Amino acid sequence: MCGRFVSTTTPPDLAGLLRASVWPSETFTPSWNVAPTDLVAGVVERVDRGTGEITRQVRPLRWGLVPSWSKDPGAGARMINARVETAHEKPAFRKAFRERRCVVPADGYYEWRPVPAAEGRKTYKQPYYLHRPDGGLLLMAGLYEFWRDRTVTGDDDPGAWLVTCTVLTTEATDAAGRIHDRMPVTLTADRVDAWLDPAVTDPGEVRGLLHAPAGELLVRPVATAVNSVRNDGPQLLEPVPDPLPEVTGGHYV
């Protein structure tokens, strides 16, 4: 799974990298500890209702997908991830899988492993930071959805709509598999256009875009300060001694 991640690239820089425009009137701050229900910078393609033109945008998405038919937006906190093996058939995700796909860029993400109790210390969970060896962005494949708040009158009221997203996950490979059995699905640059294209709606074709791995990840043990959503900043990425070298095999930086 992916329960926390790092996002420090500015929307203008994301727009330049992914040939997109920036959604107006929204500001983002870098975060080294993105948590469920936080606003994230997602990349989507939408058809303009007036012109019929497809536009690519970097826009705010709340992490944790709320299905359009949901009565309670709070349900999204439990839908931060969707399994790629079943998303095309699950009621909460299948329509978005066909019609509303997004990219959620990340510097890297965190996973945890339990550390057995030792003398003078209770069992705890050790966080690890996983990232690309070259420091490049992880282009995480996601889905997004619109939810209408029926207590707000008027579709033009900004408060009437909530736009949320989820990150697809798959079986973990390489170093990531030693930390957790699931990992985010990441896209290679040549798959982004087709993944975002709203004209691609066949579930089989969509799944075919996700077969190629986007590269090996490196693993770094970091301090347990990241466990609290109140903590943020680049210091969270500082390496610490690995309490589970037998699990990671010492393959970390």
Image (cartoon, rainbow, N blue to C red):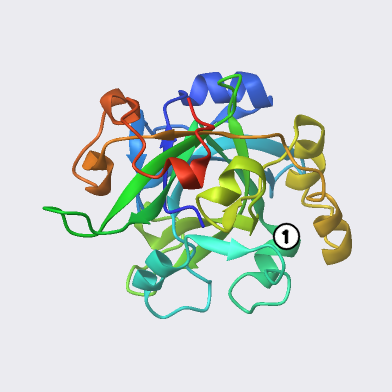
Find numbered disc 1 in the image and state the secondary structure of the residue it sits on: helix
Residue 137: quadrant of the picture = top right
Relative to 38, is 205 above or below? below
Find disc 1 in the rendering and name its residue: 99
Q: Residue lying farthest left?
A: 120
The answer to which quarter of the image holds residue 208 is bottom right
164 or 25: which is nearer to us?
164
Q: Residue at x 76, y 46 (%)?
A: 195
Q: Residue at x 52, y 78 (%)?
A: 69
160 displayed left or right of 55? left
Q: Residues within 10 Å of mark 1 (few under 14, many from 20)?
A: many
Measured from the top left, where is residue 101 in percent x and y?
67, 53
Between 41 and 180, the one nearer to me in the picture: 180
Q: Height in image: 61 above or below 146?
A: above
Please provide percent x and percent y for residue 55. 69, 37
Q: Is residue 78 above or below residue 50?
A: below
Between 252 and 211, the one lying in front of the other is 252
